Amino acid sequence: MAQVQRMSRLMLKTLRDDPADAETLSHKLLVRAGYVRRNAAGIWSWLPLGKKVLENVARVVREEMDAIGAQEVLLPALLPKEPYEATGRWEEYGAELFRLQDRKGADYLLGPTHEEIFTQLVKDQCTSYKDLPVILYQIQTKYRDEARPRSGILRGREFQMKDSYSFDTTDEGLAESYRLHREAYVRIFERLGLRHKVVSAVSGAMGGSASEEFLAPAAAGEDTFVYCPACDYAANTEAVTFAGGESADGSAHGPVEELDTPDTPTIETLADHLGVPASTTLKNLLVKVDGEIVAVGVPGDREVDLGKLEDHLAPAVVEMVTAEDFVGRPDLVRGYVGPQGLEKVRYIADPRVAPGTAWITGANKQDKHARNVVCGRDFQVDDYLDVVVVEEGDPCPKCGTGLMLDRAIEIGHIFQLGRKYTDAFQLDVLGQNGKPVRVTMGSYGIGVSRAVAALAEQTADDKGLCWPREIAPADVHVVAAGKALQTELALEISEKLREAGLRVLVDDRAGVSPGVKFTDAELIGVPKILVAGRRSGEGVVELKDRRTGEREELTVEEAVARLTAAAE
Amino acid sequence: MAQVQRMSRLMLKTLRDDPADAETLSHKLLVRAGYVRRNAAGIWSWLPLGKKVLENVARVVREEMDAIGAQEVLLPALLPKEPYEATGRWEEYGAELFRLQDRKGADYLLGPTHEEIFTQLVKDQCTSYKDLPVILYQIQTKYRDEARPRSGILRGREFQMKDSYSFDTTDEGLAESYRLHREAYVRIFERLGLRHKVVSAVSGAMGGSASEEFLAPAAAGEDTFVYCPACDYAANTEAVTFAGGESADGSAHGPVEELDTPDTPTIETLADHLGVPASTTLKNLLVKVDGEIVAVGVPGDREVDLGKLEDHLAPAVVEMVTAEDFVGRPDLVRGYVGPQGLEKVRYIADPRVAPGTAWITGANKQDKHARNVVCGRDFQVDDYLDVVVVEEGDPCPKCGTGLMLDRAIEIGHIFQLGRKYTDAFQLDVLGQNGKPVRVTMGSYGIGVSRAVAALAEQTADDKGLCWPREIAPADVHVVAAGKALQTELALEISEKLREAGLRVLVDDRAGVSPGVKFTDAELIGVPKILVAGRRSGEGVVELKDRRTGEREELTVEEAVARLTAAAE
């Protein structure tokens, strides 16, 4: 049974002012309430209260992982280069990977995620289909050399993560391991009291259920996602798929007509010059795909999402064109490109550029545009790809209602990897028919330290942190208002609560004013605050709910009974 | 409550043969029983059973640290260079420190131990004597780039350690924090079931209680220590202090007599030539101390322990002399040095070279020695320092009984650091009198992963591992001998045991022979093995004690009652 934590002996220094470098609410409050301290950019210490909260989150994660039959292991954080070289990630990770050498000059890295090492482990341990399926997990310190570590513990360079990996012999098995994780994650975030959305992380083209993110909506979030206010659709903005524009009757349009549009190399200048909405124009972006010039057409009022374009065309490399690429290409008139003149260039268009729609676009002549350029009549689309930046009000792909945009913190990610890693390490087991079967794999992560920050973001108010009970550093915060009698009563009640199985933090500090103690209690954010104050002599205390601020006077016995009952 | 762990679903591959590179018992058995796997030299993965054992050790450590009022925190493992530069340890650690740079070229290290960071933390958090004393601890991954990582997890490059640090305003406070740790460590190792000795780690000259090691006697140990079979004295061999030789009446000896001793530059050749025991000769070793030549005299049958000499003379640097040092020094005749002719050289001697004792030693002339060279009459000792390698049979400094030598694994170390680190960071707090007080500090470590190996070393037998109950991966290992009925009964009993609060591992594997299951059960080393075998139909099972091998047939009810009672 835990001991009563006396604040007179707790290493805790609360701050009245926000740290100068803090931008997000969780960063400010976790530092001010003495939960964490910064050691270097993106590198943090967890102080006594913070360590308790971190451990509480880890415990919930552990219990729910155990409940789906996952087995806990602990792999090293310092890893040899070779397995990451085998999969190409030693290079691919770029500057985000912490690399080092040992005294003999051998290359090592600090693990950002452990797919390679788990694949090797299972290859060593499992030889038959009877050994599978298996789900392994660890709660471990991970390393990523972020270019801009920020937002306190939300985006650190050293952080705590639960990563798990599933190994199955069949696609159905992988789908089942994925489903188990998805359900466990929902239970975990519900127990943590984290409001969250499960969103598709990749576009439908790659298989809708192959990867989903768990996002915690919060103003401090670095991810943007869309959701439908009418149905259950939600997605990472890069994963939104546009159902396709409506085809129109192209024959209704007049013939192509050339317009004199001097000095209108951009959509804005063009729309201005012609006095038409940008949405009636067709913007054609030139990019190089594996070195070859490709044009991408989207309505003039939309932006191309290069991330989405890259995802669609991967593993091809997408680059922007430069002035040199126009040399010797009289067919490409910079700023005045139109698809009707691009016989030799592959043309990718957004589905909104539907057959039969008519556009104002470049005339492929300097200072000239063309009107009534009709898709299907005057130009052909080689590939329809959804490559525009999603905007609020875009139609929901499921029900057509206007989508909403929100910011969120990514707190979990589940991924059906398939055979990428098992191919790299030739991980086969003997199948039921006696022949080798290539194993298929899933990988699943929860940011444990990040979940603490996300929870702080979602639950804090203007007075300070405000933890759900299961995650709070204590069940109850007993405050002794200051006089000897009050301190005596506070310690006596604390002992009673401890005996009843509660985790108790008691502010028994001498020489600290009641006002400072109340302010600290609200800043620290334990869900129930019990004050031994004015009426301590009569055995009457005040019980306050941290969230609602509701308070009532109770006898000691009533207060203990109330708190104990709430714990069950 | 934990679930029943079914071996049919456990990732576990036991091995019949010892791994080729394993030398120590714990290395062989922990690998064979599937507790750990090697990823690189000195870098290990903890598999499901191993993780449980590691966690059990960590839990015991945590509980006893909490019981002395220590506060758990979690500091980073990736640390900036600057604090370690401030104390000189960035350089001093040499090749043992893993160093790396981030993407901006800033220097970092992987923490081998955290004195600097904790000192900085306390400087940030504590400002008044009222904030002290404080004891902080963490259970964390540590890194040391060992020159020769070996013995499995006994000496790894990445390992789990509990490190704690105490901060006090007075020497008495530090002594008290040290005492609390010493007592907590004894309780921890007793609960872990680790036989151990607490030994002085530094010689009495530096303060007898300033540093002690906790050693677990084991053949695989890399430390040698001495202990007295008659009293409670025990010490690291480098810390043994010799009480001092007995002074003799020097006047009884005849005058110094020169001996012709051609070709006898070593003690062996000299003793041989003269036909006397080496113990009657005086060996004089020349060394350079901060560049100045110093002679060290010890009886001819003893070896100089350079480590002890360095400890005595620190921070002075001790080097061996080379041929060049004799150039221009006709007073130093190599191989024939005697203290009676060394007026210009500082002479350090072992206490055995007591006043009044007479020796055969060099005559400071080529091929000449001298007899009846009497200490105090013919030469003076500038400093008496105990600098010889301790040998079995040397007298106990406390009671004079002949000491015994043994090998052991260092599992803990407690250290009164004093103000070395607080001076480096100018860590003062406001004292009771309103003036700043320099804080004094202790540091204390337990090798958590190493304790697992030490425990395996001490408890294993020729059949395999053999854990104490509190540390074992389960309380009971239920074996289903193979038939459907037996498996059914085994699972039924397992469920009953689980409901009674026991941690159960059940071998329900199909297609594995009873012989293999029994061998695996003994290898894995859970303390109680319950077999659902031949008489399962009658509801009779066999309960076996892993350590004693005692077995008895019991009804299921009796077996459950017996195991449950043993757990209380």
Image: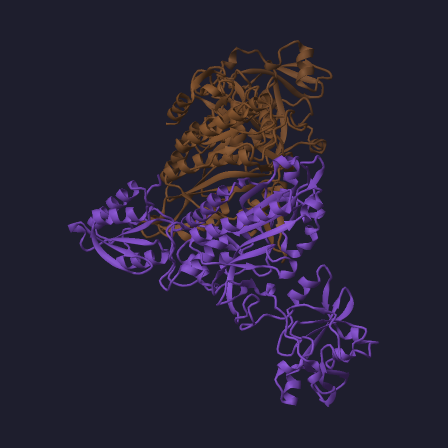
Chain colours: A purple, B brown
Relative image position of residue B254 (x, y in whole percent): 57, 11
Q: Is residue A250 in view from this perspective?
A: yes
In the image, residue A294 sits, relative to residue B415, either above or below, namely below
- What residue lies at 70% left-to-right and 60% top-to-bottom? A314
Relative image position of residue B503 (x, y in whole percent): 45, 32
In the image, residue A294 sits, relative to residue A356, either above or below, namely above
- What residue lies at 64% left-to-right and 50% top-to-bottom? A417
Q: Is residue B83 in view from this perspective?
A: no
Q: Is residue A189 left or right of residue B521?
A: left
Q: How many marks?
A: 0
In-front residue for pair B348/B555? B555
Relative image position of residue B514 (x, y in whole percent): 57, 22
The N terminus of chain A - image quarter: top left
Outermost residue to the top: B275
* Figure quadrant of residue A377: bottom right
In the image, residue B484 sits, relative to residue A536, either above or below, namely above
Outermost residue to the right: A328
In-front residue for pair B122/B333? B122
- What residue lies at 59% left-to-right and 42% top-to-bottom? A76
Q: Is residue A201 left or right of residue B557?
A: right
In-front residue for pair B411/B336? B411
Relative image position of residue A129 (x, y in whole percent): 64, 37
Q: Is residue A208 left or right of residue A186?
A: right
In the image, residue B356 sits, relative to residue B105, either above or below, namely above
Outermost residue to the bottom: A260
